Amino acid sequence: MGTRKHRERQESLWYRAELAEAPGHPFYRKLDQVLVKAEFDNFCEEQCRPFYADKAGRPSLAPGVYFRLMLIGFFEGLDSERGIAWRTADSLSLRQFLSYGMDEATPDHVTISRTRRLIDAGIHQRVFAWVLEQLARKGLIKGKTIGVDSTTLEANAAMKSIVRRDTQEGYTGYLKRLAEAAEGETTDAAGLVRMDRKRAKTMSNQEWISPADPEAEITRLKDGRTALAYKAEQAVDMESGAILAVTTHAGAAADTETLSQTVCEAGVAVSELLDQPAIDAAGVQEVIADKGYHSNATVRQMSDWKLRSYIAEPQRGHRKWKSKAAEQAAVYANRRRIQRERGKRLLAQRGEKIERNFAHQFDSGGMDRLYVRGRENVHKRLLLQAAACNLALLMRSLYGTGKPRAANDRKINRILAVLQFMRALSTFYQSPSPLSGPELYDSNILVVPPLCYSGPQKRVV
């Protein structure tokens, strides 16, 4: 089994000057200190021990190194495991973060992807829960109020490759069959395009499937395109923005169908952290969501679970509640809550606490589309992406920066602030003295040296 002890290298007796180690990136040095202090690599080794043989084959990729590589994907904004492998091999700072010397070969993308496939989703969930525990110890999780939202991610499969479930024929073959059955239609490429443009069509998931990724479904993405996709749904602590739960669904799954699973996952995650002093002893009590999650069934289910829902209600006009007394009571109670000041404030915080996490993970985090196939592999990737986002929140609370670029920008801002102060100070000394002219020689006036002058000064921003 590959362990971190294997990565603790003993320096050679003879070495060349060009093999001296780099100082490393300050952000990754701090992140490594946090992980080492919390014994992250030892935890990963203990959890992954059943997946490794004691004496068989060549030395494998250490579990701690694999999970660190996945964290690098988030912090560097890399979208694929191939990109992670290339970036790691090219960066001295990342080599130091992974404890690889300059004379060692870093893991390639085949090793990374094979390790991901062999380690099951349950271990990835435990690593995600371990990061949550570190946040709870720092008081960054309350667990009382959660917000739920989802987004669609384009799958690693093309719409051109879909086939019919019944006949297993492609889209072009399907059009040729329709053209042969119709009168006056040609079967050449131009004729098929004309016929397809004129006919009314819908791409149903009950009729079409992707042979490359059967679990991906046809859906409309956020930018309006129709593609094969998966749906990622997350529950976020509204107090700090920490991600409490991650669930993965097919791309066409409705929000009203997936809300209950995500809320249950968040409740389980909070219940496992009740021994931490910052966690509310009652667990999850309030659920915030947008109008896409509003339905009679979901609102009543939240009420049955003794949860106060703050779900935005769409305009549906006059409602009929015959034989639906329980649903009516739950919907009206939810409506009253969202119309109050606290409800409006909680709904307004969705953009800051939930949407910002999506931006960190899927925009700047380099995961705007997927490069893995299968729902389980997608779920593993989403879990580690959310764990890295939570680690960024922990780093911001400890050191003020959550990403390497943010740390670099903060350093530049400090340098610019010093330069601005020096420039303002130089301008102040070069400006005429406030005591000038004949008053300077008045015996009744005390002349104050410039370094001790405490009069009006320019404020440096």
Image (cartoon, rainbow, N blue to C red):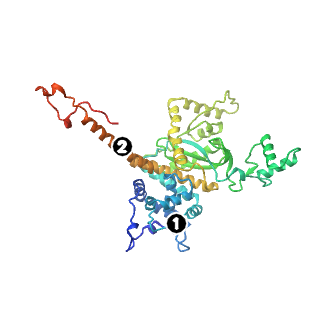
Please identify the residue farthest to the right as the structure is shown.
183
Q: Is residue 307 above or below residue 405?
A: above
Residue at 56% over, 66% down: 51
How far apart are the alpha carbons under marks 1 and 2? Answer: 43 Å
Determine crowd level at label 1: few under 14, some 14-19, many 20+ residues with C-alpha closer than 10 A. many
Residue assigned mark 1: 61
Look at label 1 and name its amino acid.
Answer: Leu
Residue 272: percent from left, percent from top: 50, 51
Look at label 2 and name its amino acid.
Answer: Leu
Q: Is residue 427 above or below residue 67?
A: above
Q: Secondary structure at mark 2?
A: helix
Question: Position of 96 compared to 430: left or right?
Answer: right
Q: Is residue 292 above or below residue 232?
A: above
Q: Is residue 25 above or below residue 51?
A: above
Q: Nearer the viewer, mark 1 or mark 2?
A: 2
Q: Secondary structure at mark 1?
A: loop
Tell me the tag on residue 29.
Answer: none
Residue 232: percent from left, percent from top: 60, 47
**Where on the picture, by quarter, is residue 101?**
bottom left
Residue 259: percent from left, percent from top: 61, 43
Please identify the residue farthest to the left as the structure is shown.
443
- Residue 212 in view in this figure: yes
406 or 235: nearer the viewer = 406
- Residue 200 in view in this figure: no
**Where on the picture, by quarter, is residue 432?**
top left
Residue assigned mark 2: 416
